[in-house]
Amino acid sequence: MCGIIGYIGNENAVPIILEGLKKLEYRGYDSAGIAVMNKDGFAVAKQKGRLSALEAFIESHPLTGFAGIGHTRWATHGEPSDINSHPHLGSRNKIAIVHNGIIENYRQLKERLEQRGITFVSQTDSEVIAQLAEYYYNGDIMDTVIRVVNALEGSYALGIMSLDEPDKLIAVKKDNPLIIGVSEKGNFIASDVPAVLAHTNQVFYLNDKEIAVVTGDSVQFYNTDREPLQKTLETVTWSADSAEKGGYEHFMLKEIMEQPQILQDTINSALSGGDNKLIIDSLDINRFNKIVITACGSAYNAGMVAKYVFEPLCRLPVEVELASEFRYKDAIIDQNTLVILVSQSGETADTIAAMREAKRKGAVTLSIVNVVGSTIARETDYTLYTLAGPEIAVATTKAFSAQLVLLYILAVRFAAKRGRISPPKEKQLLAAIASLPGKVATLLKQTDSIQKYASTCVGYKSIFFIGRNIDYAIAMEGSLKLKEISYIHSEAYAGGELKHGTISLVEEDTLVVAISCCERLYDKINSNVEQVISRGAKVLFIGNCIKATPNEKLAIIELPEANELFSPSLSVIVLQLFSYYVAANKGLDIDKPRNLAKSVTVE
Ligand code: F6R
């Protein structure tokens, strides 16, 4: 939520910052702004709306500067407007800041500053940081930043510039991500790696309350006692191309299409060698009497699927909890519980809080994360990485699929370690997982029928997704995907629950998407399908064990054969494509759905 970028070096900062903001727009897109320093002072441009509005404004009001900071916003305090956009300046125009996070004590700080005659211009919590910094400034920006940080409560990633010390940018963070990129042509601060990938793959990951003093040719780190810190420069393996659309109309479609390779890479890392395999091999599953999987949104849905894989294979209870609930529920966990945190970004505020709560209670924590160096990856006891590369579309696809395969592999390996499956069975199951990338590739060659069917679905006000057992878990992901990018109301139900209430919503031409990959439950889901058809619904039946014949009320999309436990990796491909094509036919902004942002770093 909110993306920040800063640059200082020997080139004009404006185009560099605008390019960086484009790569961060997935983090928030209701307004954007930039401030650069030049010989005349600060030059600032801010615009409500998409980044394109800011670009157009700068085109007609050009600005240049050798150092600058930029921001793309997801509003928390104060409506999206020019005035509430970042950067914010102190009232003497001496200090400019960009902020990602929430300042919880901003009201108290604001009141104190107002009593001292300082006038605020925006409704944001962030402006208090600029005003406070200017109020404290004594000719030493480092000293000022330390005083500001000591006064702030809440979460922040900050980029700070002072006109009186124009040779440096200051970066500091707490509970929100920030990296420092290092290159020949200057140095960067950014919320995320894709923002700097076009210039460098050399980055430092900032830890909480570490202060980076960034000049055009140096980076130094300090703690809040002003003691110097030594940090390791890391090499990012993501390529600059991976953050580009590569000829696709939307990142989401590109990311859907990348899935065979990503599954292959992630499976290899867990089975054939690499850090994931080492960690899985080293985990002593026999010490645990319970697994809790906690996450948000799609990552939670991956956990729901995993429950249906772990429990039958490992015969170990698995609880799946929304991280936003888990953090406040006084969970019954202890050192014999394995808590698995699933998160693409590794920065989701609720998942971070759940992780810290689990650790506080003595549980062992294992994360499944996509972003290297992210908070969750750094703080959990064990980390498995999904090798999905940068995921730019707000709606997750490839990272979700990579989460699933890691969870399957964990479940199979744990089952073997617990003596619940024989070595030949383990081999057979791992081979079934290894066959998934090829099957996904086959499915992705046959998108026409899904595209055609989706084009008939744009007019629905509501679409239901049903399944049984593991098909129900993946129906939840299908429903979430559809609603977030197509704005069509949608709900997922366990097929057997329909008659307990939901069926009253079914009427002439309601659409029900039914999933059937559990052959043993085919008759059950088929009778749900018949029940809704006899009440006027149309059904899209997706599966690999369907015996029905298509008719004007019933369309069928056949999936390749797969072990029931791993079949969600195939059904989800059709569900992702269905949502994508419905939204595309509605002409919506698929990569940046309204009100959403990719990395939910506020509660
Ligand atoms: C849905 C989606 C979100 C995320 C959720 C958790 O398409 O992307 O529901 O899954 O916000 O994010 P991470 O995985 O970054 O913790």
Image (tube, helix red, strand yellow):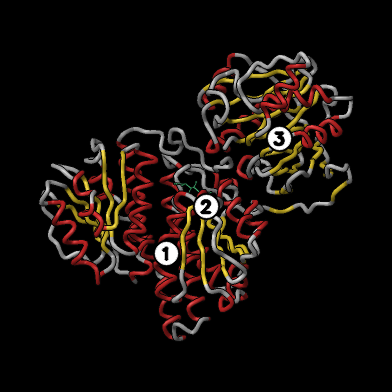
Q: Amino acid at mark 1?
A: Pro
Q: Nearer the viewer, mark 1 or mark 3?
A: 3
Q: Is residue 93 above or below residue 362?
A: above
* Residue 158, numbered circle: 3
Question: What residue is shown at x 57% (from left), y 38% (from top)?
Answer: 1
Q: Is residue 105 visible?
A: yes
Quadrant in which the C terminus appears: top right
Which residue is depicted at the point 46% across and 67% down? 318
* Chain-order first, disc 1 or disc 2: 2
Structural distance between the alpha carbons of marks 1 and 3: 41 Å
The answer to whether residue 12 is seen in the rendering is: no
Q: Is residue 200 above or below residue 7?
A: below
Residue 368 position in % (x across, y down): 55, 60
User: Which residue appears at 81% of the width and 42% of the height?
Assistant: 219
Disc 3 residue crowd, few under 14, some 14–19, many 20+, Cα 10 Å: many
Q: Amino acid at mark 2?
A: Ala
Spatial separation of the CA atoms under disc 3 and disc 2: 26 Å
Q: Which mark is residue 437?
A: 1
